[in-house]
C-alpha cells in the first residue's frame, strides 16, 4: 500500500502552506526574471 | 506592537531587495546559467498501450479469505491475471487458480517486492505486455479499471494511480476505523492527489492498485527496495531517474480492505509514514532544485504545521477567545462540513456520526508522525521489505 493517505487536511495548516507556497513561488518567479535581466544587461554591455 | 511590525516589514523588505540585487548580479556574472531552460530534462516518450497489452499481477501471502474475489474482479476486466503466492500456507494458490489466475508459488517468504519480481520474470511479463496493473490480494477493482486507467496513460506517463475506496460493508457499518479511513481517502484524493497529479509531484502512490509501464518495471522491480514501503521507493525512483509522469485516474475504482481496529490502524500508518520518511532521507528530498523537491518541501511544511498546529490550537482555545468548549464545538462544526460532504459523495449517510472519532484519530495521527520520524532516523533503511498486513475480512461473510 501507500504512504500518508490517512493524513487529514486541517484548515489552518493547509491554508498556511498554500499561502507560504504561493509567496515562495511568486518570489522565485521574480528572482528568475531579475536574473534574466542581469544576463540581458551583460550581453548588451558585452 | 507597532514597533515590532515596523521592524519586521523593514527586515523583510531589505531581505527581498538583497535577493533581487543578488539575482541580478548572478544573471550578470553567469548569463549562461540564468538563460538555461528550466525544464530542459523532458520525460521519455512511450508508445500507446491497448487493453490486451495489460496484465494484472497480484502478490499474495495467506490471502485465502479474499483472493478468489480479487482474482474474479481482475478477470472481469478482460486482462490476463497472474498471481504470486509468497509461501502461503492456507490454500491461496489453489483458490486463485480456480478463480482463473496463472499462479506461481514460492517456497520461501521473500516479501512483496521480491515476490512481484519473481513472478514478473517467471511469466516474462516485461516482454509479453506493455503495462502491468499491480494489485494487493484484498483489492476488488471495477470491470473498467484497466480501460479507465489506460485513458490516462499518455506518452509521457509511466504510472497511473487508481482511485482508492474503503470497502465498508453493511456488516461493518459501525466500525470507526473504516469510517476514518473512508473519509481520509476521500479527502486526500479529492485535494492533495489531484493537485500532485496535475503538477507531476506525486510523492506516494497506491501500491495496491496502480498501472505501471513495463519499461518502468524493468528498471525498478529488480531492485530490492531499501524502504519498508515498496511503492514509495518506486515513485521516488521514477521522479529521480526521470522515468515518466505519475498521474491519478479518479475514475479507475478499486475497493480496498483497511484496518478495523486501533492497533492495526496505528501499525499500518506507522509503517507508511516510516517508509515515507525513509524515502525523504534516502532520496535526499529537498536537496535538488526541482518542482518535485519544492512541492515535497511544502508538503513537509504542512506536516510540521499540522503536528504543531493541533496542540497549539487547543492551547489557544483554552487560553483566549470564547473558551475551550465553544472553541472545540466551532472546530467540530468546521470539520463536520467536510465529513458531511464526504458522506454524500461516498454514499455513507452514517459517516457524520463518526465525527468525534475522526477528530480524536486526527490528534492521534500527530503521534504517529513523530513516532515514524524517530523510527526513520533510527532505521533509515531495511534489509528486507517484509511486513505483516492487517487482518482481512473474509469476502462474503457477515461477521
Image: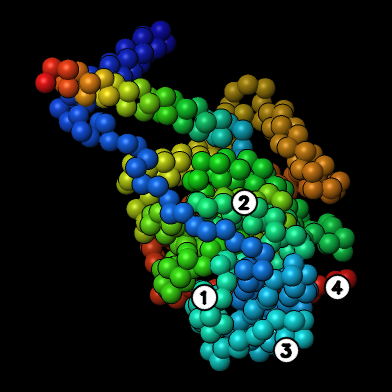
Q: Mark 4 = which residue? A: B396
Q: Do dots 4 and 3 share one subunit?
A: yes
Identify the element where label 4 is drawn.
Answer: loop
The image quarter containing residue B306 is top right
Judge by depth and name the residue closer to the eye, B161 or B127: B127
Give how far apart the Cα atoms at labels 4 and 1 are. 37 Å
Mark 4 packing: few (<14 Cα in 10 Å), some, or many (20+)?
few
Q: Mark 1 = which residue? A: B127
- Residue B94 is marked as 3
Q: Mark 2 = which residue? A: B152
Identify the element where label 2 is drawn.
Answer: loop
Left of A8 or right of it: where is B196? Answer: left
Mark 1 vs 2, N-terminal side? 1
Q: Do dots 3 and 2 share one subunit?
A: yes
Mark 2 packing: few (<14 Cα in 10 Å), some, or many (20+)?
some
Q: Residue at x 74, y 67 (%)?
A: B77
Q: Nearer the viewer, mark 4 or mark 1?
A: 1
Q: Is residue B204 visible?
A: no
Judge by depth and name the residue closer to the eye, B206 or B318: B206
Mark 4 vs 3, N-terminal side? 3
Amino acid at each position: 500500500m501507500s504512504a500518508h493517505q490517512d493524513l487529514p487536511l486541517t484548515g489552518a495548516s493547509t491554508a498556511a502552506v498554500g499561502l507560504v507556497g504561493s509567496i515562495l513561488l511568486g518570489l522565485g518567479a521574480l528572482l528568475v526574471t531579475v536574473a534574466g535581466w542581469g544576463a540581458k544587461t551583460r550581453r548588451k554591455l558585452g | 506592537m507597532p514597533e515590532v511590525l515596523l521592524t519586521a516589514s523593514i527586515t523583510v523588505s531589505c531581505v527581498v531587495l538583497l535577493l533581487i540585487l543578488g539575482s541580478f548580479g548572478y544573471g550578470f556574472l553567469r548569463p549562461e546559467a540564468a538563460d538555461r531552460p528550466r525544464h530542459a530534462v523532458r520525460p521519455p516518450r512511450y508508445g500507446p498501450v491497448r487493453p490486451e497489452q495489460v496484465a494484472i499481477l497480484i502478490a499474495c501471502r495467506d490471502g485465502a479469505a479474499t483472493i478468489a474475489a480479487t482474482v474474479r474482479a481482475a478477470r472481469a476486466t478482460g486482462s490476463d491475471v497472474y498471481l504470486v503466492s509468497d509461501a502461503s500456507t492456507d490454500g491461496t494458490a489453489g483458490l486463485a487458480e480456480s478463480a482463473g489466475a496463472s499462479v506461481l508459488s514460492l517456497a520461501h517468504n521473500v516479501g512483496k517486492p521480491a515476490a512481484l519480481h519473481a513472478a514478473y520474470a517467471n511469466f516474462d511479463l516485461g516482454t509479453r505486455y506493455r503495462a502491468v496493473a499491480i494489485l494487493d490480494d484484498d483489492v476488488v477493482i471495477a470491470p473498467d479499471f484497466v480501460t479507465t486507467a489506460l485513458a490516462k496513460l499518455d506518452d509521457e506517463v509511466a504510472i497511473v494511480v487508481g482511485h482508492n475506496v474503503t470497502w465498508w460493508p453493511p456488516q461493518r457499518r459501525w466500525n470507526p476505523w473504516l469510517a476514518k479511513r473512508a473519509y481520509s481517502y476521500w479527502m486526500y484524493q479529492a485535494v492533495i492527489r489531484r493537485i500532485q497529479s496535475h503538477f507531476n509531484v506525486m510523492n506516494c502512490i497506491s501500491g495496491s492498485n496502480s498501472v505501471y509501464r513495463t519499461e518502468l518495471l524493468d528498471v525498478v522491480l529488480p531492485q530490492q527496495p531499501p524502504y519498508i514501503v515498496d511503492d514509495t521507493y518506486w515513485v521516488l525512483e521514477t521522479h529521480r531517474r526521470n522515468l515518466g509522469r505519475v498521474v491519478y485516474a479518479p475514475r479507475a475504482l478499486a475497493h480496498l480492505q483497511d484496518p478495523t481496529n486501533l492497533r492495526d490502524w496505528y501499525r499500518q500508518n506507522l509503517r507508511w509514514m516510516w517508509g515515507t520518511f525513509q524515502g525523504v532521507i534516502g532520496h535526499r528530498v529537498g536537496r535538488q532544485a526541482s518542482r518535485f523537491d519544492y512541492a515535497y518541501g511544502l508538503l513537509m511544511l504542512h506536516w510540521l504545521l499540522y503536528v504543531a498546529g493541533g496542540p497549539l490550537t487547543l492551547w489557544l482555545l483554552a487560553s483566549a477567545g470564547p473558551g475551550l468548549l465553544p472553541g472545540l464545538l466551532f472546530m467540530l462544526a468546521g470539520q463536520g462540513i467536510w465529513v458531511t460532504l464526504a458522506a454524500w459523495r461516498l454514499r455513507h449517510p452514517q459517516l457524520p456520526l463518526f465525527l468525534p472519532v475522526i477528530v480524536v484519530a486526527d490528534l492521534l495521527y500527530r503521534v504517529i508522525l513523530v513516532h515514524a520520524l524517530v523510527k526513520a532516523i533510527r532505521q533509515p533503511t531495511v534489509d528486507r521489505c517484509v511486513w505483516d498486513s492487517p487482518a482481512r475480512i473474509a469476502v462474503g461473510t457477515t461477521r
